[in-house]
Amino acid sequence: MQTSFTSRDVVALTGITLRQLQWWDERRIVVPSREGHRRLYSTEDLAEVAVICELRRRGFSLQRVRKVMRFLQREFSKRLAETVSGSSDYHLLTDGRTLYLETSARQIVDILKNSRQPMLTICLSDTVRQVRATIRNAEKKASAISAAPDPVRSGRKVS
């Protein structure tokens, strides 16, 4: 699997804009490595961008996103993609004030039953799996294109 992605790769894989990505780097929400002036994103960075995109689609302000990402980093003590790659499904639940991170379906149901207001739920594991699947599909397409014979070089007539 590809280990580093340019800003343009991240835009193509997640659908966000280059400006959003640059702004998130400037605000230290997702900080890629650098190669000269180029930003290079790891698979872990890409997973975090995908989670942030999901939170933003669900109406979270960037300030709230920062709090969620700090919460996740405190809870995991390592990168999001490294943590959710195991067999457990991690679910982030929030009522807008309180954040819950659960792996047990029973705990999730208990939280939902006892909630006094609507809860937002995001399966972090699904988001990370989706990013990895998207990367694999993009790599398959790229290798299929590069493996295809060049009709000009093979002597075939091109119309």
Image (cartoon, rainbow, N blue to C red):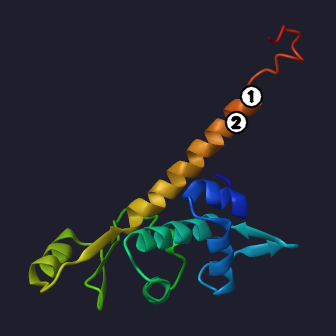
**Residue shown at the point (64%, 61%) measured from the top left:** 10
- Helix, strand or loop at label 1? It is helix
Q: CA distance from mark 2 to mark 1?
A: 6 Å
- Label 2–label 1 contact, CB within 8 A: yes
Identity of the amino acid at label 1? Ala
- Judge whether residue 5 can be spotted in this image: no
At 59% from the left edge and 65% from the top edge, which residue is drawn?
46
Percent of width and height locating residue 11: 63, 60
Task: Name the residue type under label 2.
Answer: Ser
Instruction: Name the residue: 78% across, 20% down.
Output: 149
Task: In the rendered structure, find residue 17 and report the number of the disc placed on it.
Answer: none
Seen in the picture, residue 120 relative to 135 is either above or below; the reply is below
Q: Identify the mark at residue 143; answer none if there is no mark.
A: 2
Q: Residue furthest left?
A: 113
- Image-based side of 99 in relation to 14, left or right: left
Q: Residue at label 1? A: 147
The x and y percentages for residue 21 are 64, 72
